[in-house]
């Protein structure tokens, strides 16, 4: 029988690991801290890649590839960067049978190696902007790992851009943040809060970091993508200079930004339930599964002929699969595809074939209300409409869940209660001391200072002094 999934209400963390493994998204690797992304999980990642890549290219970015190894001296050139990343670096000291003259860092992120190249490529304002993205793996030595959420090696995209002015670089930072928001909400069905990171939570080496934050099924936050305004920090460290129109030598202004395989963890934790995964149709590796049902040989022949006919018609527009495994019962198959989060199931029995109809079963709705009969001739339209409805409904459910679990404390006592049960949106004075005291006491961190503010000043939820902005406080993965 299929692997049993621990109910999320009993133990969310075990539920998560059970779902990831039972649905065959990923498995633990022989190397501690590493994971194997299995074909079903990788197909999901490929769909994430396609959706993001289209958006990057539509905004003028090009893909390139830079080396996995970074000379140790490069990492040390930007002071905050090296301080932030040092504890989690993997270092190669031996190669080709002898000690290396200079140790090589296995990239934890590629600002340093990429900017060393930009320093050679950029000469004049005509070379700008540089808009490059790379899809790759990175390594950050993690002591405690969780599949997709925190692993020593993970996959991601990292964009690195260089611009003539601070304004252009800031516009790029926010353009990418908007791409991430649009992707998360419209492809992954995950409502997010776009905002700015506090000083203590920002990327090592950035001037400002921006993020999209999402609420997971246990009401904790997950950072689902980040976009950094780097100012001239790396430009000065690596000497990336250009002659402007007035023939003056200037340093470039830069950004970097990334989304990783963590996004898969977010999809699992936002949409999944006790039956397993629920995948948003736009990203699901299989959007429609056809399950034929028969009792005897005659029924089998009729049903299979029609099922194959439906498969070939629907495959032109949708990612479809016909489950023709003979040794398994329909009930087992239903359960199996529900666990794997396939958005829509088509059931087809001998009576359906006689009536010229099929039964559609939605994964996103409760059992009592998830079935409908549709004429076979009308299937392509009905499937498209139903997938669209599922996509919208998953987003709406997640948004409702976040709204129901977001609180607006005005006193510290209320904030303490709020972060134990969800997100707290409260005024914060901007002091790192208030932020640290709240974290120490409640384990909640500032997830972001939302871009959207009502513009009215208030009092800091911790110290009571004047505050211009509200921040989202929450426990986080
Ligand atoms: Zn304060």
Image (spheres, grey):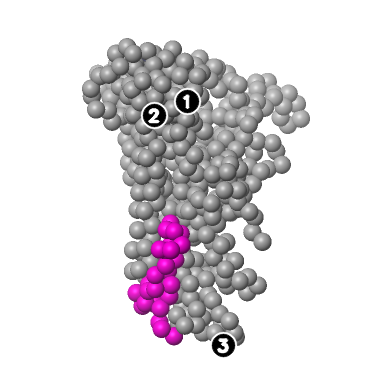
Q: Quadrant of the N terminus?
A: bottom right
Q: Earlier in the sequence, mark 3 or mark 2?
A: 3
The image's mark for residue 424 is 2
- Report the magenta residues as a range: 354-379
Q: Visible in this render: residue 171?
A: no
Q: Position of residue 130 (x, y in %)?
A: 37, 32
Instruction: Give the mark toward the camera: 3 or 2.
Output: 2
Is residue 166 placed above or below 387 in the rendered structure?
A: above
Q: Earlier in the sequence, mark 1 or mark 2?
A: 2
Q: Position of residue 403 (x, y in %)?
A: 35, 39
Q: Earlier in the sequence, mark 1 or mark 3?
A: 3
Tell me how far mark 1 sits from mark 3, CA to CA. Answer: 62 Å
Q: Which residue is mark 1?
A: 444
In this rendering, position of residue 163 left or right of residue 3: left
Farthest residue, direction right:
97
Within 10 Å of disc 2 (Cα), the crowding (few <14, some 14-19, many 20+) is many
Tell me how far mark 1 sits from mark 2, CA to CA. Answer: 9 Å
Q: Which residue is mark 3?
A: 298
């Amino acid at each position: 029988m299929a692997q049993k999934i621990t109910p999320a209400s009993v133990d969310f963390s075990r539920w998560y690991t059970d779902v990831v493994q039972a649905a065959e998204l990923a498995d633990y690797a022989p190397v501690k801290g590493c994971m194997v992304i299995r074909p079903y999980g990788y197909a999901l990642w490929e769909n994430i890649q396609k959706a993001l890549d289209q958006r990057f290219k539509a905004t003028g970015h090009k893909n390139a590839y830079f080396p996995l190894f970074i000379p140790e001296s490069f990492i040390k050139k930007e002071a905050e960067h090296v301080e932030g990343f040092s504890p989690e670096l993997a270092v190669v000291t031996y190669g080709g049978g002898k000690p290396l003259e200079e140790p090589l860092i296995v990239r934890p992120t590629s600002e340093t190696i990429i900017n060393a190249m930009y320093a050679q490529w950029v000469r004049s304002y005509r070379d700008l902007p540089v808009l490059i993205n790379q899809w790759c793996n990175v390594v950050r030595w993690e002591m405690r790992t969780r599949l997709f959420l925190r692993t020593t090696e993970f996959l991601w995209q990292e964009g690195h851009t260089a611009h003539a002015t601070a304004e252009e670089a800031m516009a790029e930072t926010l353009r990418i943040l908007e791409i991430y928001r649009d992707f998360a909400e419209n492809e992954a069905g995950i409502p997010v809060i776009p905002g700015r990171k506090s000083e203590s939570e920002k990327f090592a080496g950035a001037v400002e970091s921006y993020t999209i934050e999402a609420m997971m099924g246990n009401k904790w936050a997950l950072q689902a993508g980040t976009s950094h305004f780097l100012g001239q920090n790396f430009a000065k460290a690596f000497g990336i200079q250009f002659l402007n129109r007035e023939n003056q030598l200037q340093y470039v202004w830069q950004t970097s930004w990334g989304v990783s395989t963590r996004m898969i963890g977010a999809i699992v934790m936002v949409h999944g339930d006790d039956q397993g995964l629920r995948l948003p149709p736009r990203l699901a590796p299989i959007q429609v599964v056809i399950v034929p049902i028969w009792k005897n040989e005659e029924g089998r022949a009729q049903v299979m002929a029609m099922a194959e006919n439906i498969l070939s018609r629907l495959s032109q527009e949708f990612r479809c699969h016909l489950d023709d495994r003979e040794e398994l019962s329909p009930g087992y198959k239903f359960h199996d595809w529900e666990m794997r989060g396939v958005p829509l199931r088509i059931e087809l029995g001998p009576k359906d074939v006689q009536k010229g109809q099929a039964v559609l079963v939605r994964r996103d709705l409760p059992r009592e209300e998830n079935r409908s009969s549709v004429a076979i001739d009308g299937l392509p339209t009905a499937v498209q409409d139903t997938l669209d409805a599922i996509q919208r409904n998953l987003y709406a459910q997640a948004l409702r869940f976040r709204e129901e679990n977001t609180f607006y404390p005005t006193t510290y006592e209320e904030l303490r209660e709020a972060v134990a049960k969800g997100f707290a949106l409260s005024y914060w004075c901007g002091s790192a001391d208030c932020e640290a005291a709240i974290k120490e006491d409640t384990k909640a961190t500032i997830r972001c200072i939302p871009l959207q503010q009502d513009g009215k000043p208030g009092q800091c939820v911790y110290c009571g002094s004047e505050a211009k902005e509200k921040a989202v406080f929450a426990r986080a993965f």
